[in-house]
Amino acid sequence: MAGFRGMVAVLLGLLAGLPQSAVAEDFPTFIAGLWPEASRPPYSITRPTFDRATVGLTPDLSLPDLQIPGRPPQAPSGQAEFIRPPQDYLKASQLAHLAQQGRALAQQHAASLRRIESEIGVEGPIVLAIWGRETAFGTYKLPHNALRVLATQAYVGRRKEEFRREFLYALKLVEDRIVEPAAMRASWAGAMGMTQFMPSEFYVSLKGLNGGRPDLFNSVPDALASAANQLQQKGWIKGLPWGVEVDIPATADCALEGPLQARPLAQWAALGFRRSDGRAFTNSELAIEAYLMSPGGAYGPAFLVTENYKVIRRYNTSDLYATFVGTLADRIAGGGDFRRAWSNIAQLTERDVASIQAMLRERGSGIEKLDGKTGSNTRAEIGAFQRKAGIKVDCWPTAALLQTLKTTSSGAANRK
């Protein structure tokens, strides 16, 4: 019997491996099929470059965000912004360490940063904070081969068309001798260089400070100038703060969150919102348009954020990322820690968050996406539901909220 069970286990293992084996076997055919498109503008790859860059390329089926036949769906994202709870992502010790490094680097690269602010219009602390968040000021060694991960995502990723384009632009980087394949180290999504550009962005935002071809891999001034250039292209407004930590008055709650509820700071002040550092808003600040953003719901600091916060989110679409970069920039410029402490926030799985989103949408809420991510829209809609239901308003997808929604949904179904 034991021998029979062993044979069954082996057979099941072989069967489970069949879909992945078939996927890997078809990969060279997929790569070969890209040649006609690669040879045409805007890529204009020559055959020798195409062959040299793709020879021996194999798929990396361990990456997140893949959709492989016969394999259970993976979590939609492997990004830390969507899988780590706020108190871990915005860890005080890490921010303090990076801020200390950032202040030293601000002195070391002071001349370049002054030129960046003068010529591009983006302040030094922000671009330093981007560099710190993306690669820990160049000390984080990117783990992946960019060509391999981009080709894999283009082949069996959840966003095939997007990554197909990026893979072809990566080949163009090789064609144009901007970088050699061996130096193309990347994140799991193919972002490269000190400030993490996708291949297409090299052709849109790359900017040098000292003449010659800009180098995002080895030149700190070029990497910082390129990050500043991309922020400026996305709408950066020089002199506008990204946001400020505030105390929510007892007469309001976190359900006021989100860009759809933006208003001048004067109106927030009239509602009882105050800066957490005790300072009053200046007359010029009172005219600034801002919206409430609470990345941990009622379980952490809350902020009134401006258009420049949205710009940081366009660099990386995550509230946690934008808050990290904004607060790190403040600390590099001399600011301190958050005034309000983070609670020990539990992070539900993306599948559970998506279930909460779906059940809220069924009840008529304005949930925009069933993506399993706890963004501003989801937090605000949770708060609105809680307020209407007369339960604690915390604007966070908790296990208790999930159970409440399931119970009330079941009750409604039973009454039909």
Image (cartoon, grey):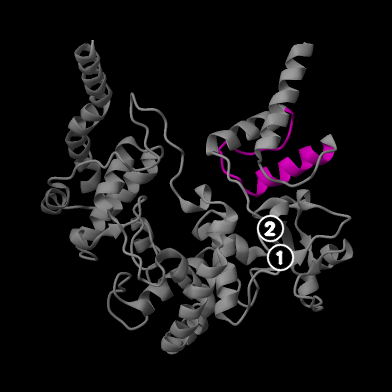
Q: For the residue carrying disc 1, how many other residues have a C-alpha within 10 Å: few (<14), some (14-19), or many (20+)?
A: some
Query: Which amino acid lies under the numbered mark 2 shown in the image of this protein?
Result: Gly
Q: Residue at x 76, y 18 (%)?
A: 411
Secondary structure category for the residue under label 2:
loop
Is residue 196 shown above or below 238?
above
Q: Which residues are magenta?
A: 363-388
Question: Callout 2 environment at 10 Å: few (<14), some (14 to 19), or many (20+)?
Answer: some
Q: Is residue 364 magenta?
A: yes
Say what amino acid the circle numbered 1 marks: Arg
Q: x%, y% of residue 191?
A: 36, 57
Between residues 200 and 411, which one lies in front from this camera angle? 411
Residue depicted at x 75% and y 66%: 246
Q: Is residue 338 left or right of residue 176?
A: right
Mark nearer the N terminus (1 vs 2): 2
Seen in the picture, residue 236 relative to 37 is either above or below; the reply is below
- In the picture, the disc for residue 300 is 2
Separation of residues labelled 1 and 2 (CA atoms): 6 Å
Find residue 340 and name its label. Answer: 1
**Residue 99 left/right relative to 187:** right
